[in-house]
Amino acid sequence: REFEAEIRFYAGDDPLDVWERYIKWTEQMFPGGGKGGNLAAVLERAVRALHGQQQYYKDPRYLNLWLKFGDCCNEPLDLYSYLRSQEIGTTLALLYITWAEVLEARGSFRKADLIFQEGLQRKAEPLDKLQAHHKQFQARVSRQTLLALEESPVGDNMGLLEIAEPQRSSLADLKGRGKKKVRAPISRVGDAVKAMNPNSQPLASLQLSNTPGFAVFDENSVSGPEMPTLTAQSWPAPPVPRAKENELSAGPWNSGR
């Protein structure tokens, strides 16, 4: 109640300070993310209340608030793209480190490296921290590359990131196997390999967009990885967080107890 009253009647020149203390208090009082804290709702209110205040775009506190809100969203990658398009936190190393870590966890090593390279080109601060995380990322990819070289001799002429991310030819012919019962071979790559390995870490769930139409894409014709060009657009509402607790879906009124 004290924080709500302070936010409602605040007349100072740093409203971010109130929201930051409110969020820290919520995290301390409900460390396990309990329903009583309702942290996702507080974060959503904070980004709405501070939206468009450009004096905070280079403030580490403001970026940290956005990144915490991204953890509550179904697809944080969309939020990171939005932050870059609006130039929010693009001078700070934390944005690129967090973005690259999410991509690496999903097996997108080349895209993660591109994000690191972008941060280095912008000389995001602290630069030494960004460089250290990039070197650690390269070391992890190198270890996976060595393992791939031991298993596959065809990787001699491939780059580090190409070996770390196995590729599968699109639109290729499948030759059946078996004499009595012909079966098409299954070639699992990337995330599918991790999903089949019981010792691997669980992958973050991906959402598929409901696009009405699609075009056949041949990944073999692409010369190299390219990040999509984003244009700043008006933002009517923040990204939708994950489903909140204690919310019941609609249903027949006489079917429940």
Image (cartoon, rainbow, N blue to C red):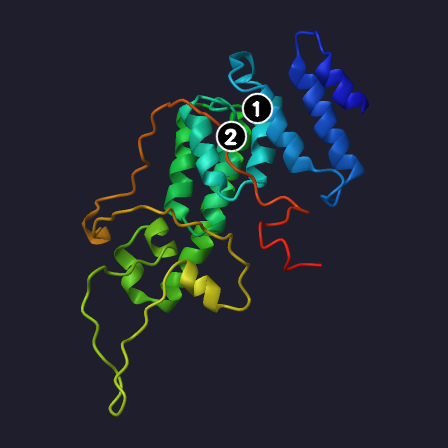
* Image quadrant in which you'd find residue 175: bottom left
63 is higher (above) or lower (below) than 222: above
Question: Which one is nearer the viewer's eye here, 224 or 51?
Answer: 51
Task: Report the amino acid beneath label 2.
Answer: Pro
Distance (Cα) linking label 1 and label 2:
7 Å
Q: Is residue 153 visible?
A: yes
Tell me the residue at 75%/33% (across/down).
Answer: 26
* Image quadrant in which you'd find residue 189: bottom left
28 is higher (above) or lower (below) than 195: above
> Is residue 253 shown left or right of residue 232?
right
Number of numbered discs visible in the structure rendering: 2
Tell me the residue at 27%/63% (across/down).
Answer: 154
Residue that lies at the very extreme toward the front in this rendered image? 254
Q: Is residue 134 visible?
A: no
Tell me the residue at 21%/46% (across/down).
Answer: 222
Q: Which residue corresponds to mark 1?
A: 48
Question: Which one is nearer the viewer's eye here, 193 or 146?
Answer: 193
